[in-house]
Amino acid sequence: MAFAATNGMVGISIRDTALRMAEVTQVAGESRISRLSQGRVRSALNFTSLQDHTLIRRYAEDINRLYETADFQISSGVFILDSKMVTIKKIPVDVNLQGDRLRNHMRWEVEQCMINPLEQYVVDFAPLPAEDGKELAQIVVVVARRSVIDYFKEIFQNTDLQLRAIDVDVFAAQRVFSGNYGGGEDEYVALLDMRKDGFQISLFKGATFYFSQDVDYQNDEQVEAAKRDDEHLVRHVSKELRRLIIDYKLGKSVEDLRAIYLYGDGVNDRIVEALQNTHNVRIDLANPFKKIKLASPGGEAMTPSQPETFVIPVGAALKGL
């Protein structure tokens, strides 16, 4: 969903039962985080719950309760979809394709890989920066089931917030990374979203999306049996990082990355320390407040105990600002 720029936005994310919201406003052309809050929804948000339309009003009530309790002032909101609920692909196209020709071609490309009729999906895409002299450009395509998008639209029709956009977690994280950390155009950085049921690896070249991949613990019985063992988890993360780097011909080892930043509910200091002891590369918790000013309307500094858990709602709120 695209929308016009505004002077403020509330980013909303729900992961399992964790509900988080961040309000970002524009002050003298500078983005400033003015409110943060976190709470719970009464029913975990997942594919099963999306089949139950009786939960729509319950989710709306939970969002409204947190919004009002934290005294949020901005009425425009961006909601974040879990990347597991969408399909993300990179498709090469002729650099000369523009406008309707490009839109028609992308629809045709999506039709080739979707089982159901195209009308059952919402398709959005964005071109990546084209390399000079190249005949092909890379297009990032996101495909979501229309029923999923309609479900979230109906939730927000019952809240005090006007839904201005629906975003995807991996792109919200990219927005936070771009706003807080610098990097060379030819350097690769990995973002690790550590979850209770797995982790997501997203890779960026400079500040540009390169790829993302979700890894579920239940796909590996050995990992499932030991998923609460941080050392075992670190070995699993290292193995996946190394495999992706080699498969995509980005280097020979994890050390060929410029940095690795971790965020999400499933990360802790022990995991970070174990990864730091394993790889000779910068590894740290992602901090969405590293450069973006964070202060309450009264001027008092807000200091969340776990800044890395607010990466996604802050990235959502930055959309369009």
Image: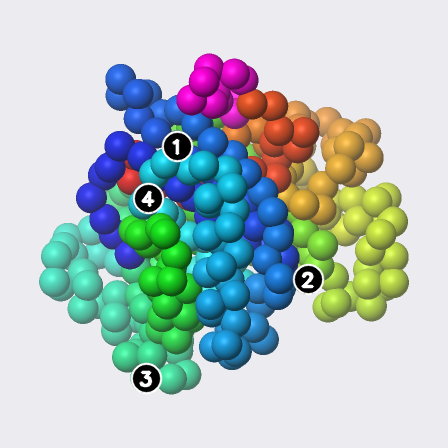
The relative height of residue 160 versus residue 278 in the rendered view (above or below) is below
Packing grade of label 3 (10 A; few <14, some 14-19, many >=20) is few
* Residue at which label 3 appears: 117
Pick the front one: 290 or 233: 290
Q: Is the Cβ of the residue at disc 1 closer than 8 Å to that at disc 2?
A: no
Circle 2/circle 4 CB separation < 8 Å: no
Magenta run includes residue 291:
yes
Residue 216 marker: 2
- Residue at horizontal 46%, vertical 52%? 64
Q: Which mark, by number, is residue 24? A: 1
In the image, is residue 62 above or below residue 39?
below
Of the numbered discs 4 and 3, the one sitting upstream in the chain is 4
Which residue is at 63% across, 43% downward? 264
Q: Which residue is drawn at the image coordinates 49% and 53% (left, top)?
A: 63
Q: The residue under label 1 is which amino acid type?
A: Val
Lower sequence index among marks 3 and 1: 1
Numbered disc in front, either 2 or 4: 4
**Residue that badge 4 annotates:** 75
Label 2 is placed on what type of residue? Asp
